[in-house]
Amino acid sequence: MLGGMTTNADARVDSTPPRRRAPAGAAVLREDVTEAIRAAVFEELAAVGYARMSIEGIARRAGVGKTAVYRRWRSKLHLVLDLVSAVAVQGLPAPDTGSLEGDLRLLYEVTSRALRHPVAGQIIPDLQAEAARNPEIAEAMQKALREGQQSVATGIVAAAVARGEVREGVDEDLALDVMFGPLYWRAVVVRSPKLPKGYLASLTRATAAGLRAL
Protein backbone atom coordinates (compact mmCIF):
# COMPACT_ATOMS: atom_id res chain seq x y z
CA MET A 1 0.00 0.00 0.00
CA LEU A 2 1.07 3.55 -0.62
CA GLY A 3 -0.66 5.04 2.41
CA GLY A 4 2.59 5.42 4.36
CA MET A 5 4.14 7.78 1.81
CA THR A 6 5.53 10.97 3.34
CA THR A 7 6.23 12.97 0.16
CA ASN A 8 4.09 16.10 0.10
CA ALA A 9 5.07 17.66 -3.21
CA ASP A 10 5.06 16.48 -6.78
CA ALA A 11 8.24 16.26 -8.80
CA ARG A 12 9.01 19.03 -11.25
CA VAL A 13 10.49 18.89 -14.72
CA ASP A 14 14.26 18.59 -14.36
CA SER A 15 16.96 19.98 -16.62
CA THR A 16 17.10 16.84 -18.82
CA PRO A 17 14.57 17.16 -21.65
CA PRO A 18 12.02 14.30 -21.39
CA ARG A 19 10.72 12.45 -24.40
CA ARG A 20 7.50 14.49 -24.19
CA ARG A 21 8.18 17.94 -22.78
CA ALA A 22 5.77 19.50 -20.31
CA PRO A 23 5.06 23.25 -20.50
CA ALA A 24 7.77 25.37 -18.87
CA GLY A 25 7.35 25.45 -15.10
CA ALA A 26 4.47 22.94 -15.11
CA ALA A 27 4.36 20.31 -12.36
CA VAL A 28 4.71 16.67 -13.33
CA LEU A 29 2.03 14.73 -11.46
CA ARG A 30 3.68 11.65 -10.03
CA GLU A 31 1.65 8.50 -10.58
CA ASP A 32 2.61 6.98 -7.24
CA VAL A 33 1.24 10.05 -5.44
CA THR A 34 -1.97 9.87 -7.51
CA GLU A 35 -2.44 6.20 -6.63
CA ALA A 36 -1.77 6.91 -2.95
CA ILE A 37 -4.52 9.54 -2.97
CA ARG A 38 -6.98 7.22 -4.73
CA ALA A 39 -6.30 4.46 -2.21
CA ALA A 40 -6.79 6.97 0.61
CA VAL A 41 -10.17 8.01 -0.82
CA PHE A 42 -11.44 4.43 -0.66
CA GLU A 43 -10.25 4.11 2.93
CA GLU A 44 -11.65 7.49 3.96
CA LEU A 45 -15.02 6.78 2.34
CA ALA A 46 -15.26 3.48 4.21
CA ALA A 47 -14.20 5.09 7.49
CA VAL A 48 -16.27 8.29 7.60
CA GLY A 49 -18.59 8.34 4.55
CA TYR A 50 -18.87 10.91 1.77
CA ALA A 51 -20.57 13.64 3.82
CA ARG A 52 -17.80 13.72 6.46
CA MET A 53 -14.94 13.05 4.07
CA SER A 54 -12.55 16.00 3.59
CA ILE A 55 -9.55 16.83 1.45
CA GLU A 56 -7.56 17.26 4.66
CA GLY A 57 -8.45 13.75 5.81
CA ILE A 58 -7.61 12.25 2.42
CA ALA A 59 -4.25 14.03 2.29
CA ARG A 60 -3.39 12.95 5.83
CA ARG A 61 -4.28 9.32 5.11
CA ALA A 62 -2.27 9.37 1.85
CA GLY A 63 0.74 10.99 3.51
CA VAL A 64 0.74 13.98 1.16
CA GLY A 65 -0.02 17.68 1.38
CA LYS A 66 -3.42 19.14 0.45
CA THR A 67 -1.83 20.87 -2.54
CA ALA A 68 -1.01 17.46 -4.03
CA VAL A 69 -4.72 16.62 -3.95
CA TYR A 70 -5.87 19.98 -5.31
CA ARG A 71 -3.40 19.76 -8.21
CA ARG A 72 -5.39 16.77 -9.42
CA TRP A 73 -8.99 17.44 -8.33
CA ARG A 74 -10.83 20.68 -7.56
CA SER A 75 -12.96 19.18 -4.79
CA LYS A 76 -13.88 15.94 -3.08
CA LEU A 77 -16.87 15.66 -5.45
CA HIS A 78 -14.62 15.68 -8.52
CA LEU A 79 -12.27 13.25 -6.80
CA VAL A 80 -15.05 10.75 -6.11
CA LEU A 81 -16.53 11.19 -9.60
CA ASP A 82 -13.12 10.42 -11.11
CA LEU A 83 -12.74 7.38 -8.88
CA VAL A 84 -16.16 5.99 -9.77
CA SER A 85 -15.48 6.57 -13.48
CA ALA A 86 -12.16 4.72 -13.19
CA VAL A 87 -14.03 1.70 -11.85
CA ALA A 88 -16.17 1.72 -15.01
CA VAL A 89 -13.06 1.73 -17.20
CA GLN A 90 -11.46 -1.15 -15.32
CA GLY A 91 -14.65 -3.19 -15.30
CA LEU A 92 -14.88 -6.85 -14.40
CA PRO A 93 -12.74 -9.60 -15.91
CA ALA A 94 -14.49 -11.30 -18.82
CA PRO A 95 -14.72 -15.04 -18.04
CA ASP A 96 -13.94 -17.55 -20.78
CA THR A 97 -14.45 -21.06 -19.42
CA GLY A 98 -15.95 -22.60 -22.54
CA SER A 99 -19.54 -22.88 -21.28
CA LEU A 100 -22.36 -20.54 -20.31
CA GLU A 101 -22.75 -21.95 -16.81
CA GLY A 102 -18.98 -21.93 -16.28
CA ASP A 103 -18.75 -18.27 -17.31
CA LEU A 104 -21.67 -17.30 -15.08
CA ARG A 105 -20.31 -19.18 -12.07
CA LEU A 106 -16.89 -17.51 -12.37
CA LEU A 107 -18.51 -14.11 -12.83
CA TYR A 108 -20.64 -14.58 -9.72
CA GLU A 109 -17.73 -15.74 -7.61
CA VAL A 110 -15.65 -12.68 -8.54
CA THR A 111 -18.55 -10.23 -8.21
CA SER A 112 -19.72 -11.71 -4.92
CA ARG A 113 -16.27 -11.36 -3.36
CA ALA A 114 -16.00 -7.77 -4.57
CA LEU A 115 -19.45 -6.72 -3.34
CA ARG A 116 -19.02 -8.39 0.04
CA HIS A 117 -15.60 -6.89 0.72
CA PRO A 118 -15.82 -4.81 3.93
CA VAL A 119 -14.69 -1.61 2.18
CA ALA A 120 -17.17 -2.04 -0.68
CA GLY A 121 -19.87 -2.86 1.86
CA GLN A 122 -19.38 0.58 3.41
CA ILE A 123 -18.75 2.64 0.28
CA ILE A 124 -21.49 1.42 -2.08
CA PRO A 125 -24.51 2.09 0.21
CA ASP A 126 -23.06 5.47 1.21
CA LEU A 127 -22.59 6.57 -2.40
CA GLN A 128 -26.05 5.28 -3.31
CA ALA A 129 -27.54 7.46 -0.60
CA GLU A 130 -25.47 10.42 -1.77
CA ALA A 131 -26.53 9.77 -5.38
CA ALA A 132 -30.15 10.35 -4.36
CA ARG A 133 -29.16 13.93 -3.44
CA ASN A 134 -26.46 14.61 -6.03
CA PRO A 135 -27.25 14.15 -9.76
CA GLU A 136 -23.55 14.15 -10.71
CA ILE A 137 -22.75 11.25 -8.40
CA ALA A 138 -25.91 9.45 -9.57
CA GLU A 139 -24.86 9.78 -13.22
CA ALA A 140 -21.30 8.64 -12.49
CA MET A 141 -22.50 5.60 -10.53
CA GLN A 142 -24.98 4.59 -13.22
CA LYS A 143 -22.26 4.86 -15.84
CA ALA A 144 -19.81 2.86 -13.73
CA LEU A 145 -22.28 0.09 -13.02
CA ARG A 146 -23.68 -0.20 -16.53
CA GLU A 147 -20.51 0.29 -18.58
CA GLY A 148 -18.39 -1.85 -16.30
CA GLN A 149 -20.80 -4.77 -16.51
CA GLN A 150 -22.46 -4.31 -19.90
CA SER A 151 -19.31 -5.34 -21.75
CA VAL A 152 -18.96 -8.45 -19.58
CA ALA A 153 -22.60 -9.43 -20.08
CA THR A 154 -22.35 -8.83 -23.81
CA GLY A 155 -19.23 -10.98 -24.03
CA ILE A 156 -20.79 -13.87 -22.10
CA VAL A 157 -23.95 -13.80 -24.22
CA ALA A 158 -22.00 -13.51 -27.50
CA ALA A 159 -19.83 -16.51 -26.57
CA ALA A 160 -22.94 -18.50 -25.60
CA VAL A 161 -24.59 -17.63 -28.92
CA ALA A 162 -21.47 -18.75 -30.81
CA ARG A 163 -21.55 -22.10 -28.96
CA GLY A 164 -25.26 -22.54 -29.68
CA GLU A 165 -26.25 -22.27 -25.99
CA VAL A 166 -28.33 -19.10 -26.41
CA ARG A 167 -30.40 -17.91 -29.34
CA GLU A 168 -29.28 -14.95 -31.44
CA GLY A 169 -30.97 -11.60 -30.96
CA VAL A 170 -31.11 -11.69 -27.16
CA ASP A 171 -32.04 -8.33 -25.62
CA GLU A 172 -28.69 -7.28 -24.09
CA ASP A 173 -30.22 -4.92 -21.52
CA LEU A 174 -32.59 -7.64 -20.32
CA ALA A 175 -29.72 -10.14 -20.24
CA LEU A 176 -27.74 -7.70 -18.07
CA ASP A 177 -30.66 -7.39 -15.64
CA VAL A 178 -31.08 -11.16 -15.45
CA MET A 179 -27.37 -11.76 -14.89
CA PHE A 180 -26.60 -9.11 -12.27
CA GLY A 181 -29.93 -8.23 -10.67
CA PRO A 182 -30.30 -11.09 -8.14
CA LEU A 183 -26.75 -10.86 -6.78
CA TYR A 184 -26.86 -7.07 -6.41
CA TRP A 185 -30.24 -7.32 -4.72
CA ARG A 186 -28.96 -9.75 -2.11
CA ALA A 187 -25.49 -8.25 -1.59
CA VAL A 188 -26.17 -4.50 -1.94
CA VAL A 189 -29.87 -3.88 -1.25
CA VAL A 190 -30.73 -6.59 1.29
CA ARG A 191 -27.10 -6.80 2.44
CA SER A 192 -27.34 -10.38 3.62
CA PRO A 193 -24.42 -11.05 5.97
CA LYS A 194 -23.77 -14.42 4.34
CA LEU A 195 -24.89 -16.13 1.16
CA PRO A 196 -26.76 -19.39 1.75
CA LYS A 197 -24.84 -22.57 1.02
CA GLY A 198 -25.05 -23.43 -2.67
CA TYR A 199 -26.58 -20.04 -3.55
CA LEU A 200 -24.11 -19.18 -6.33
CA ALA A 201 -24.49 -22.63 -7.93
CA SER A 202 -28.29 -22.32 -7.86
CA LEU A 203 -28.14 -18.75 -9.18
CA THR A 204 -25.87 -19.89 -12.00
CA ARG A 205 -28.30 -22.61 -13.11
CA ALA A 206 -31.32 -20.30 -12.85
CA THR A 207 -29.61 -17.50 -14.79
CA ALA A 208 -28.43 -19.86 -17.52
CA ALA A 209 -31.98 -21.19 -17.88
CA GLY A 210 -33.33 -17.65 -17.99
CA LEU A 211 -30.89 -16.60 -20.71
CA ARG A 212 -31.78 -19.65 -22.80
CA ALA A 213 -35.46 -18.74 -22.47
CA LEU A 214 -35.04 -15.13 -23.64
Image: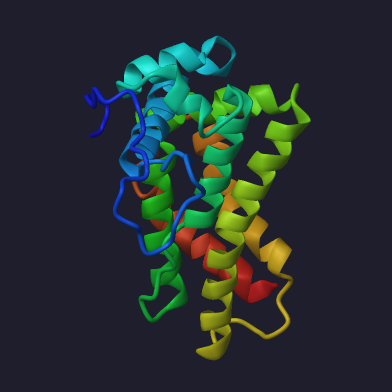
Residue at position x 43%, y 62% in the image: 20
Q: Residue 119 placed where, x, y %? A: 39, 28
- Residue located farthest toward the top when viewing the structure as drawn: 52
Residue at position x 24%, y 27% in the image: 5
Closer to the camera, 53 or 63?
Answer: 63
- Indicate whether 52 appears above or below 211: above
Q: Is residue 125 visible?
A: yes
Left or right side of 133 for 112: left
Quarter of the N terminus within the rendering: top left
Quarter of the C terminus within the rendering: bottom right
- Indicate whether 155 appears above or below 8: below
Q: Residue 152 placed where, x, y %? A: 53, 65
* Residue 141 position by quadrant: top right
- Indicate whether 28 appears above or below 41: below
* Residue 56 position by quadrant: top left
Q: Residue 153 placed where, x, y %? A: 57, 66
Closer to the camera, 116 or 90?
Answer: 90
Residue at position x 56%, y 31% in the image: 73
Q: Residue 192 placed where, x, y %? A: 46, 30
